Amino acid sequence: MEDLVNAYDSNSDSNDGEGSLVHDNVNFDSLKEKFKLNSTPQILIKESINISRKIDSHAKEVAYNPKYEELFQPEFTYELAIAGNPIAIGPQNPFKTKQQAAPKNTLSGYVEDSHFNDFQFENQRRTFATHGYALDPSVGDSNFSGNSIIGDLDVAKRLDGRTVFESGKNFGSEKRKRDERGNPSDIDNYKGPWAGYVDENKIAKPTEEEQAVLDDWKSVTTKKNKEENVVEERSTLHIKDPLDYQGRSFLHPPQDVGVRLNSEEPPEKCFLPKKHIHTWTGHTKGVAAIRLFPMSGHLLLSCSMDCKIKLWEVYGQRRCIRTYLGHDKAVRDVCFNNDGTEFLSAAYDRYIKLWDTETGQCKGKFTNKRIPYCVKFNPDEDKQHLFVAGLADKKIITWDIRANEIVQEYDRHLGAVNTVTFIDDNRRFVSTSDDKSLRVWEWDIPVDSKYIADPTMHSVPAVTLSPNEKWLACQSMDNQILIYNAISKMRMNRKKVFKGHMVAGYACQVNFSPDGNTNKNVSQSPPMPGFSYVISGDADGKLFIWDWKSTKVYSKFKAHDQVCIGCCWLPHETSKVITCGWDGLIKLWD
């Protein structure tokens, strides 16, 4: 202490401004070392630290006033039980380990509050995230040593254990330099904030390994394209007498079957089919759709998942007349033109092909690299060179057969287009889609004139127009057949809802019996009665027949072992129905 007092001058209390208060011969470094002085001691703020003292469980008296958080009930011990301590109630648990018997303030043990500087914690976290090492928090020594470092020791040794805060700009990647921005007055050469970097490589060239992978991919894709183009269209005639004694082909309706096939008058009254009379076999996979020959219905066209299209006789020997081969994937839909001399086929190979029904020649191929879901000729006589296709890419496209080009595109749906149906003397058509809506279009106007959608609606995969062209039957995915008025404002007839079958997930075709009023003139006097029945297949292979007036199920029977996907009523017969299923069979019922 004398050394500390002697360091100051005797006149240190004077107000004299002259002279020094400290002797010149005093060394402050020796004083700091001798008295261990710390000019800037670290001060802990007590408010930021929750200090709690642990009381020994065996202590019998406490020399200070403990807080409520520090108090606890003494644990039971054998000594307390011998001494008769009233706190020791009950026997000792012999199965408790020392860890379980230790004092606890949490479920896992005794937790002491500790304080850690936020800056130091964030500094070590960023150092570990950047360089892969940090100081071991369990070691109290803050100096750099091999034992106090966790993580990548090699990097820590190379950087002398510096943190990201200490390193600064001394190591790490420096900021990349940009090119000069240029003079704003020079419009052509001014780069501004879009100037590139000095060492920027603007040409990306693949490595040798990446180039090899790209070459393999190109070779595979070109091979696939060549294979797609190799598909050859051909047909096979299965009958020996394609011409009759007058030189007419099989397209001409027969006159010796006991039915007037050339008549335009429908049968007066239809009856329920009851028995199976014939099965057409020839498809090796499920049949997707069947279409009858226009007007007469003496021929049946079927498309299948075995990529084949077949033409069958409905009357006489009921033979397979011709097979058309030209698709390498399943055929989705087929459609005759008005006189039946040509038909279109749409398949999953993204092609729509035009065939000559009699010769089997492929007259045209149409594709826009999208899968067609439905295809339909324009029924007008002066527009037989145009057809409409609903595609998987939400569009409806009109093709011109003569020029082989797309002449119109209807792009308003939000899902794949399932069906296209012409109504109102072919001036309008109705389309359904997976977006659970119906849209009505004016011909050749790519904006829908009516949009029908409701939160309770389901998608409609199959639509059929009634014989009198007044009603539209829509197969709904909620196991119902909904009826819309096709003449006036396309409103749903809520009294005509046909239920009872199971079609969820399948595009089962709907059809009507051909009897009743087929005259389009509504003001006919006296009016003939309407058609009698509505028919549809279902997922269990059954054929359902409903009464049109009462919407009751009149008949149902097992038609196929798998899904009954299609059905049609012969236009000149009173009770003959053709069905097709995914079992590859086509059956005739009477």
Image: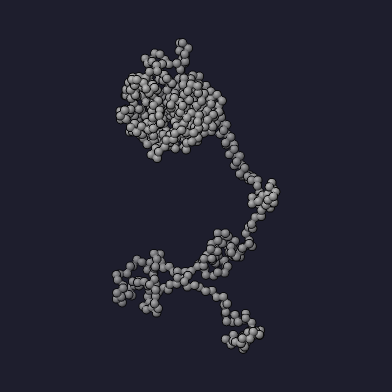
Q: In which quadrant is the C terminus drawn? A: top left
Label total for image: 0
Residue nearest the viewer, comparing 573 with 277: 573
Task: Give the residue displayed 50% in from the left and 19% down from the top.
Answer: 359
Vertical order, 81 against 446 (above or below): below
Q: Please, which residue is most extreme toward the top here?
A: 246
Task: Give the residue displayed 34% in from the left and 20% down from the top.
Answer: 525
Task: Give the residue displayed 57% in from the left and 66% down from the top.
Answer: 146
Vertical order, 82 against 314 (above or below): below
Q: In which quadrant is the N terminus drawn? A: bottom right
Residue nearest the viewer, comparing 128 with 385: 385
Residue 291, horizontal then vertical, whole percent: 43, 24
Any part of residue 121 in sight? yes
The reply, left or right, for residue 560 in relation to residue 371 is: left
Residue 464, horizontal then vertical, whole percent: 40, 28
Q: How is the image coloured?
A: one colour
Residue nearest the viewer, comparing 493 with 526: 526
Q: Please, which residue is most extreme toward the bottom here?
A: 10
Residue 35, horizontal then vertical, whole percent: 57, 82
Any part of residue 329 in sight? no
Task: Give the residue displayed 39% in from the left and 73% down from the top.
Answer: 67
Place residue 472 in its image quadrant.
Answer: top left
The reply, left or right, for residue 159 in relation to residue 327 is: right
Vertical order, 574 against 100 (above or below): above
Residue 509, horizontal then vertical, whole percent: 40, 29
Vertical order, 17 against 197 (above or below): below
Place residue 170 in its image quadrant.
Answer: bottom right
